[in-house]
Image (cartoon, helix red, strand yellow):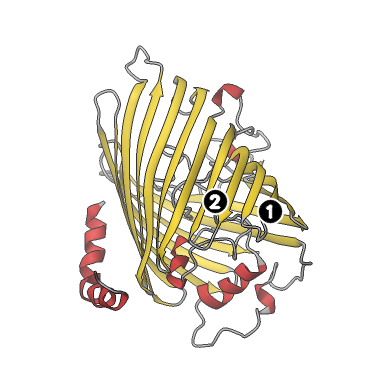
Amino acid sequence: MLDRHAWGRVVRLLSAFGVVAALLWSRPASAYPWMIRHEYQGCVPCHADPSGAGLLTEYGRAMAENVLRSRYGSKPPDEPAVYSRFLFGVPTPDWLLLGGSVRNGIQWIKPAGQAFGPPLFLEMEADVKAQVTVSRFRAYGSIGWMRQGAQLTQITSHVDDPGCGLVGSNICEGNLVSREHWVGVDLGEDKQFLLRAGRIDVPFGIRMDEHDLFVRSTQTTRTNINESQQHGVSLAYTGQTVRGEIMAIAGNYQLNPDAFRERGYSGFVEVSVKPWAAVGASSLVTYAKTDFQTQTPNTIRQVHGAFARLAPVHQLVILTEADALITTSDPQPNGTGGTVPGFIAMAQADVEPTQGLHVVVTGESMVQGGPGGPYPSYDGWFGLLWFCAPHTDVRFDLVTLSTAGQPVQIYVLPQLHIYL
């Protein structure tokens, strides 16, 4: 078996071929599973949510300044920089965590055989977040505003105009949104367990920023951190070598009517096999009287899969996930419904040639059943992510996408993210 040093020699010899292969093989802030390169396998030290993403702890803010961003030749300070605090320097008491996130982008889409369309302004996130802790008890919440979309997180009900999103347009209505809000209690002598109730990120697979990936999309597994949260009760565990979470899903009570709400369970477990390697498994089963996307009655969704996070050398992190999808609903006269199988495979390589700059290549392949199926889909994605300044990162994505056998389309998406 190759040791870590041998892995390094292999990677150096084959890195160029690996990037090309990943592009040919197939397919944004707050969850960075590639932190395993620093031998941070769990999420508890840096995030209020034990499974990752969302509000940063004070330790997480210090890590963002010392480990994530480009230092331009300077050494990290011995003590956390003052500007790493909330709002670039506002002190908060120990019992209060405050944060926020603003992420915007501009997207150009090129349909097959056509030129690039007009630029679309994308407001991905504009949220403020807070957690209050009293002894073992916590209360967490977020609230934000979206010019368009994010239907599953809305707490107001203005309707968007079809022209919303065009650069220069000001006709969007806008809605208040709340992605997460829960109360919880830390259990166990070392507070290894967290019991929560409220609207919570669905525990499943690799928790990552890219909410449009097939493995996370609202069109497939419905497990992203952008808008797929559900109301329910969860129990999370964080140990030395094992972490995981199980959630009883009561439905999304920001989605109406009640017939659209999915109820069931979701969970994952991840085991550390090396300081730089972890493997896990996930499972989700839900039932809805009517599926809110397909409108099919009595819909049971099952998603079961496995994933891995590996850092064979410090500069390289490999993320992989494979999920089987089985959707069962009442057969319909138009041929839809019944039992529809599917399968998704994802692989991502994150290379950090110098601190703060990431080159990310992702490939995905998906097969879904249905009338006249199966329908193959794939995407290939090349991204540059740069933590260029305190509280700031910029990102550029180039994505090629083919869904259900349709011709390939391309989109380009630069983004700016500032966290408070």
**Residue linked to disc 1:** 186
Place residue 114 in its image quadrant.
top left
Amino acid type at mark 2: Met
Quarter of the image where the C terminus is located: bottom right
Q: In this view, does 204 lie to the left or right of 84?
A: left
Quarter of the image where the N terminus is located: bottom left
Query: Residue at image x 48%, y 61%?
Result: 241
Where residue 182 sits: x, y (%)?
A: 68, 45
Query: Residue at image x 35%, y 11%?
Result: 333
Question: Which residue is farthest top?
Answer: 333
**Residue linked to disc 2:** 124
Where residue 37 sits: x, y (%)?
A: 43, 70
Crowding at label 1, few (<14), some or many (≥20) Cα neighbours within 10 Å? some
Q: Which of marks 2 and 1 is nearer the N terminus?
A: 2
Amino acid type at mark 1: Asp
The answer to whether residue 310 shows anywhere in this view is yes
